[in-house]
Image (cartoon, coloured by chain):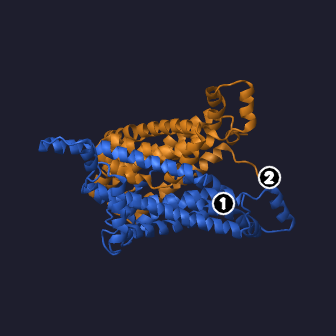
Amino acid sequence: MNRIFPILTVVFAILAIWYAGSFLMNRAWVMDQAARAGTEPSVSEVFRDTMNQPRAKLPAPHQVAAELYDGIFDKKITSKRSLVYHGFITLEATFYGFVLGIVVGVALAVLIVLSRAADLTLMPWAIISQTIPVVALAPMIVVLTNAMGAGSLMVPKAIIAGYLSFFPVLVSMVKGLRSPDQMQLDLLRTYGASQSQTFWKLRLPASLPYFFASLKIAVAASLVGAIVGELPTGAIAGLGARMLIGSQFGEPMIMWASLFAAAILAALLIWVVGGVEKVAARLMGVRPA
Amino acid sequence: MRQSPSTAMKIALPVGFGLLVILLWEMMVKTFAIPPAILPAPSAIATRFAASTDILWIDFVQTVLKGAVTGLILGAIAGLLVAILIDRSPFLKAGLLPVANFVAALPIVGIAPIMVMWFGFDWQSKAAVVVVMVFFPILVNTLAGLQDTDRMQQDLMRTYSASYLQTLLKLRLPAAMPFIFNGLKISATLALIGAIVAEYFGSPTRGMGFRISTEVGRLGIDMVWAEIAVSALTGTVLYGLVALVERAVTFWHPSQRRG
């Protein structure tokens, strides 16, 4: 209880500030309308009108909540206006990107740990790859995958998501594979273990906690990649594409609803991956601190 | 024990690898006669780069200097100040830290269309997106950094009868620097992404994101790659600058020790 109370207070404060912001930002429009109609609205009337504008500058929280509910529960899942439909398309790209990121990240980490030359050659480029804004590369990834015969947008989106998510896995796995100390390595040498035996029986098991710890960051990065990948690629379905459509047609409610749908999706993904991490930790015999 | 590699090797290997990739790319494009509308050769991109430095510079000023860097500085200052303020109240810290941690993991780029709606097409909206994206990593890292002094050090400051401000400036902020720079490194790459993404939602007729989306439409793929080269260089230099300042500020930290 002691931990929940401060959090609730903060969330409540954020909602209060949001309502105040809605009132202040939407007031100009209400006053403008009133001036044109030649009426003098009272404060309570202004307040009521700022809370229910269909194209508000800042929609009030209950408007966004209603739009979210409508998009998630009231629309058929197959409908092009259903947030679940768009969410699943983004989720699919996130999933493929996540898997791609794990495979590439682990493979590179193994290469880097086993070979000194690979470490010196690849590690700087792995860091540089993350400083390059992937959004700039995105349209080129689409052009190239199209030329290679990928029919759908799923392939480039997954590549962009993988591009963002492989890095946390790589960094953690390198750390994890190097975590056995000199004592443990020496012990295996006294057993006459070969390099591959040392890898499979010591380095790999030792790296697993690091691996699972990196997954939460990787899945969040993958979702960002999937959404960003929908923006400059001409996608018409997915949460990112929905934001673009809302922006182009001047429908703020669509933008807000997709933004929050993306946030909910992120929370769910992190929650699921966090659960996997906990189960894995228990199976590996980590005692709760 | 294996010998640690010389500095020359540390530079030669990655640079050589980069050159090799460019060489292979050039040869692949030439031998398979890949049309420039799909993948131009590096030489063609370099020619285009040299021929349009004026446009590239205009885009650079618009996106990087006005959008990303302004937003990065404002967001970092805001995150730092809020962290220091929150740090004084255990109640706020207990409430805000989980919320901030959660928000930091969300796809904040999604606010880009909203910021464009609020602040218009010019660089102000791009800077606003960057401010929000940068704010949370800095806030979370600064708060973690301010916790990094132990009881002993704080007690020492108390025996010196140091005031809150003195303890903050002379002990806790310096101790937090490695964390703050961690946040800044994350933010430096986020800033560029935010500034470019926001341009896809509307921009004046200049800027890197604008140029990329229009040139893709006109099949000016070599120009797109020239912009990518600029963004890649900018991202790397920005990150490098932060790392350099970090080395100067946190020279005392174990991770910076060499030799």
Q: Which part of the image, by quadrant, shows the C terminus of chain A?
A: bottom right
Q: Is residue B53 left or right of residue B243?
A: left
For residue B135, say whether it is visible.
Answer: yes
User: Given the current orientation, which residue lies at the most extreme right position?
Assistant: A190
Give the percent coordinates (x, y) of residue B54. Answer: 32, 39
Q: Residue at x 54, y 36 (%)?
A: B85
Where does label 2 land, which residue? B1
Q: Residue at x 52, y 35 (%)?
A: B81
Chain shaded orange: B
The Cα–Cα distance between marks 1 and 2, rounded to whole angstroms, is: 25 Å
What mark, if any, has residue A210 been given in the picture?
Answer: 1
Give the percent coordinates (x, y) of residue A241. Answer: 34, 62
Chain letter for mark 1: A
Chain shaded blue: A
Q: What amino acid is found at the position of numbered circle 1 in the picture? A: Tyr
Disc 1 and disc 2 in contact, CB within 8 angstroms: no
User: Given the current orientation, which residue lies at the most extreme top position?
Assistant: B161
> Which element is circle 2 on?
loop
Q: Which part of the image, by quadrant, shows the N terminus of chain A?
A: bottom right
The number of numbered badges drawn on the structure is: 2
Q: Is residue A83 above or below residue B22?
A: below
Q: What amino acid is found at the position of numbered circle 2 in the picture? A: Met
What mark, if any, has residue A102 been given in the picture?
Answer: none
For residue B38, say whether it is visible.
Answer: no
Give the percent coordinates (x, y) of residue A144. Answer: 39, 64
> Which element is circle 1 on?
helix
